[in-house]
Amino acid sequence: MKQTLYEAVGGLPTLEKVHKIFYDKVYAHPWLGQFFRGHDQKIIELRQTQFMGEKFGGDIRYPGMDLELAHRRMYIPPGLFELRQNLLRESLEEAGVAGEHIRRWLRIDSAFHRQIVKKSLAAFEATDLKYERPVVIPDPEENKGL
């Protein structure tokens, strides 16, 4: 029987370690960090650990909101998702996760791209969010010198 990714990476301790390193980077990032203002980092780390632990085949349950619903009101362009993936790759390497497991981890993580990333700002703005306030945060690097 093939080992689950959860087992292969070392289970809960590894996921917790990776997500601590990762969210330290995310919260410190000038663009990505803005999406998390007002959200307790420890809670975000816990939810991500539960979510990925479940997806990796661990005996762990994610009690949080559906991914698409949780990100519905946020304008997340492809470049922001790519930035997030790069920070995740760095975090996995820093945590000492083996290369073959990093590839599997990133492949599973990338599978949620369609549920999170918006095709364009115009398409996002056309979304009926009912009573939710949209979150659109421009890349601060693109606005330097304006």
Image (cartoon, rainbow, N blue to C red):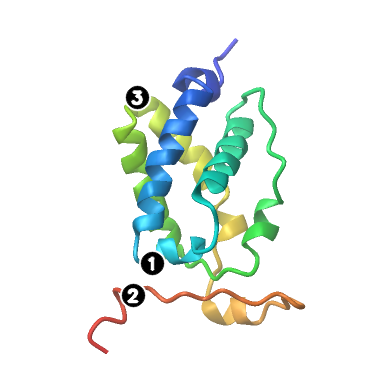
Circle 2 Cα neighbour tier, 10 Å, few/some/many (<14 / 14–19 / ≥20)? few
Residue placed under numbered mark 2 in the picture: 140
The residue lying toward the viewer, choosing from 54 and 106, is: 54
SS at badge 1: loop
Q: In this picture, is 3 found above or below 120?
A: above
Q: Do we see residue 111 in this rendering?
A: no
Which residue is denoted by mark 1 in the rendering?
31
At 68% from the left and 77% from the top, the residue drawn is: 127
Q: Write down the quadrant of residue 100 in the picture.
A: top left
Total tally of numbered discs in the picture? 3
Quarter of the figure with the N terminus? top right
> Looking at the picture, how far across and down is residue 97, in whole percent?
36, 27
Residue 29 coordinates in the image, percent (x, y): 35, 60
Q: Is residue 49 above or below residue 59?
A: below
Label 1, label 2: how far apart the Cα atoms are = 6 Å
Determine whether, in the image, residue 28 is placed left or right of residue 78: left
Label 2 or label 3, whichever comes before in sequence order: 3
How far apart are the alpha carbons under marks 3 and 1? 29 Å
Q: Nearer the viewer, mark 3 or mark 1?
A: 1
Three-letter code for the amino acid on which mark 3 is drawn: Ala
Q: Position of residue 92 (x, y in %)?
A: 36, 35
The residue under the point 52% across, 22% down is: 11
Q: Badge 1, how many Cα within 10 Å: few under 14, some, many 20+?
A: some
Q: Position of residue 101 (x, y in %)?
A: 41, 27
